[in-house]
Amino acid sequence: QVQLVESGGGLVQAGGSLELSCAATGSLFGINTMDWYRQAPGKQRELVASITPGSSTTNYADSVKGRFTISRDNAKKTVYLHMNSLRPEDTAVYYCHLRRVGSDYWGQGTQVTVSS
């Protein structure tokens, strides 16, 4: 069984930074791609960033490229999302996701609010 717990969200002014963390339990963390998604009010959930098990490949949504960085520590079973130059349009609930064929593991989400 996998549990994902996000932390690090909060209120920040535009231009500021935040780092989100997602701690996992279970044995699947080190062998699966991890994603960060976000969902703003009234909008669909969107993929923000992903990272392969060995951290060799990362991918980002165009809207966050150059501002956000995803990383992971397999020994700590934790994935991070470092967010710089935050904008009001980054306001959303951010979720981590463990990507595995035939299964779907999500955290409970953490709110990020960027004020203008």
Image (cartoon, rainbow, N blue to C red):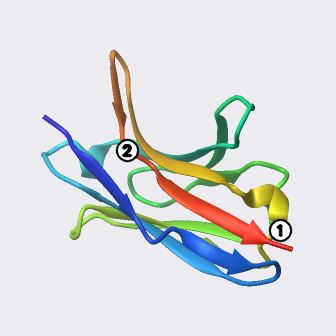
Residue 16 image position (x, y, % from top left):
73, 84
Q: Secondary structure at mark 2?
A: loop
| Relative height, residue 82 to residue 25 (above, below) | below
Residue type for callout 2: Gln
Q: Horizontal placement of 74 versus 64: left or right?
A: left
Residue 91 image position (x, y, % from top left):
71, 57
Residue found at x 30% / y 54%: 5
Quadrant of the rendering where the C terminus is positioned: bottom right
Residue highlighted by disc 1: 87
Q: Secondary structure at mark 1?
A: loop
Q: Earlier in the sequence, mark 1 or mark 2?
A: 1
Residue 32 image position (x, y, % from top left):
35, 42
Q: Horizontal placement of 4 versus 64: left or right?
A: left
Residue found at x 76% / y 48%: 61
Q: Is residue 84 visible?
A: no
The reply to whether discs 1 and 2 touch (Cβ–Cβ < 8 Å) is no
| Alpha carbon separation for disc pair 1 and 2 | 23 Å
| Relative height, residue 108 to residue 15 (above, below) | above
Residue 50 image position (x, y, % from top left):
56, 49
Residue highlighted by disc 2: 108
Q: Is residue 100 visible?
A: yes
Q: Residues within 10 Å of mark 2 (few under 14, many from 20)?
A: some
| Relative height, residue 104 to residue 81 (above, below) | above
Quadrant of the rendering where the N terminus is positioned: top left
Residue 86: name its quadrant: bottom right
Residue type for callout 1: Arg
Q: Horizontal placement of 37 versus 13: left or right?
A: left
